[in-house]
Amino acid sequence: MRSQIKEEITFRKLEVLLAYLEGGNLTSAAEKLDISAVSVHRALHSLEESTSCKLFNLEGRNLIPTNAALVLADAAREVIQTMVEGIRATQRAAGYSSDHLKIGSLYSLTTRTAPEVIIGLKMRKPELQTELVLGSNADLLQKLKQNAIDAVLMAVPEAEPEIESVPLFEDEIFFAAPAGSPYAARTEVDLRDCAKEHFVSLAEGFVTHHGFLEAFRQAGITPNVVMQVGDIFSLMNLVSAGMGYTLLPGRVRNVFGEKIKLIPLKYPFAMRQTIGLSFLRVRERDPNLLALSAVCRMSRHNAG
């Protein structure tokens, strides 16, 4: 069915009509909408042409609304209110500016970073309910793109134009060995010396797993991985028990106390991760995400 509404009739022009009727003159309507009186007059004249109806009678310098203008105004109020409610419903469905925020996080960030960020957000927006969703970098990034979560604390993704990121800190990757192992007393570890050792690692999709493979690729050896696990704390348990060595980010240094030693990697195998807050760029003006971003930027400033 062909629309009988001309494209010149816009929500903005209908708002101008309502502002004029409420204010009674061009100047009042212009001040209310923060536009010029000329723009108000032009919008009203455009509505007359688009509806093919005389909406105003000119008496001196005043535009006196006709009955047609009042009828159009009644319809405009209803249409604009319906659209406002529709936009709010759409935003709620997308998680925009709701009272509930789902924040994704790597397991390794739950020891300090995620709790600090959530507490900071709670101080800014006490009414906001937060939910923490844990997973790997790949899993969390997919959930973010599908709007299953609102934001995520993880390694900053590369080449993702639809993702906006706020860097929090850079973390060094270390060689992890159980206390008392031959490597525990070293000041640095050359991965080329570890070709015959047993290793444990995170499963594919974790940023630390990617770094693990990249470090050994640079060393020119294939690590003998005897087991893979789905979270970093299980991985550390295996190292502590002597199941094998691995590579770990410095942020988990104090989780197992003295049971695990983190030794720097010898150049050129040293690696770092950039950890940050990421969210969809299309939602960058979401008030909840603006508050969350502010907390993260403040956290970065305090850390610096």
Image (tube, rainbow, N blue to C red):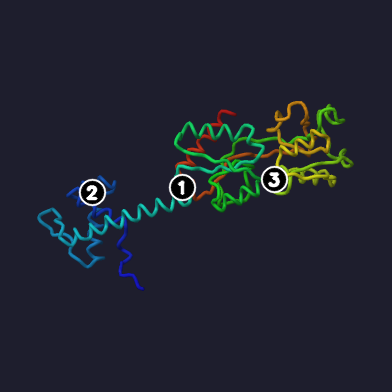
Outermost residue toward the left in this view: 60
> In front: 59, or 200?
200
Side of 286 where 112 appears, left or right: right
| Occupied quadrant, residue 287 | top left
Q: Residue at x 41, y 52 (%)?
A: 89
Q: Quadrant of the N terminus?
A: bottom left
Q: Which residue is mark 2?
A: 29
Vertical relation: 40 (above or below) 244? below
Q: Amino acid at mark 2?
A: Ala
Q: Which residue is mark 1?
A: 96
Quote the CA–CA distance across marks 2 and 1.
Answer: 31 Å
Label 3 SS = loop
Q: Earlier in the sequence, mark 2 or mark 1?
A: 2
Q: Residue at x 20, y 66 (%)?
A: 53
Q: Earlier in the sequence, mark 1 or mark 3?
A: 1
Side of 245 where 277 appears, left or right: left
